[in-house]
Image: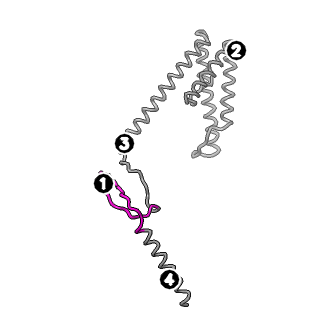
Amino acid sequence: MKKKVLPIIVVIFMSVGWFIYRALHVPTEKVVETDSDSKVITFDSKLPPSLKINTPASSPTPKAPEEKKNYRIRETKDEQFEAFDKLDSAWLYKAKEIIGADKYAQYLEMRNRNDREKMQAYKEYHDYLRQKYGDKFSYNITDDQSIREKQINQRYLKDLLKLIGPDKFKKYTAVKDQFNEEMRRSNKESIQIEF
């Protein structure tokens, strides 16, 4: 029994001695702690480098009141709507130049019907999902819905082709594609002209 206890005691003493040696022979560094009251406390640290936590010394940033954030969000949304309106007006100006003033009113009516029909298709799809899954559901626009919107757009584009003729229609689609490409390049993918 004594033969087993003696090696265990030796190992314990050596371990304790090693930890004490490591703690006493660590180079000391000055550590600065800052408080929010900007008082600086300096003391010598004798912790081993492996146990030190390095955090950047930075002052706490004051948070803005929540009301201001909400106001800024609304302001940003208003700016986004204004930007969208400007881009839409620019597109309508280009479309009027291509289509011609005599058929522009018919184009606007077709565009409004296109938007209403897509909105109606969206509502029907939403009602279908509500009946199927109940009131508390969420979904992303699916391929079915996107296909339906594309079908509506294609029908109205065919009607526009009949209205303005193939030459103007070719120019219309080229300008529309160029406009959409400019929106993609300026990181405004959400603003795309479909019709």
* Residue pointed to by mark 1: 40
Q: Amino acid at mark 3?
A: Ala
Extent of the magenta region: 23-49
Q: Earlier in the sequence, mark 1 or mark 2?
A: 1
Q: Disc 2 versus disc 3: distance between alpha carbons?
A: 57 Å
User: Is residue 7 part of the magenta span, yes or no?
Assistant: no
Q: Amino acid at mark 1?
A: Val
Q: Amino acid at mark 2?
A: Lys
Q: Earlier in the sequence, mark 2 or mark 3?
A: 3
Q: Disc 2 versus disc 4: distance between alpha carbons?
A: 100 Å
Q: Nearer the viewer, mark 1 or mark 2?
A: 1
* Residue pointed to by mark 4: 9
Q: Nearer the viewer, mark 2 or mark 4?
A: 4
* Residue pointed to by mark 2: 162
Q: Residues within 10 Å of mark 3 (few under 14, many from 20)?
A: few
Q: Disc 4 versus disc 1: distance between alpha carbons?
A: 45 Å
Q: Nearer the viewer, mark 4 or mark 3?
A: 4
Residue at (38, 42) in percent of width and height: 66
Q: Nearer the viewer, mark 2 or mark 3?
A: 3
Q: Position of residue 83 (x, y in %)?
A: 49, 25
Q: Earlier in the sequence, mark 4 or mark 3?
A: 4
The quarter of the picture where residue 184 lies is top right
Q: Secondary structure at mark 1?
A: strand
Residue at (34, 61) in percent of width and height: 44
Q: Earlier in the sequence, mark 4 or mark 1?
A: 4
The quarter of the picture where residue 176 lies is top right
* Residue pointed to by mark 3: 64
Please report contact status of discs 4 and 1: CB closer than 8 Å, yes or no: no
The quarter of the picture where residue 21 lies is bottom left
Q: Secondary structure at mark 3?
A: loop
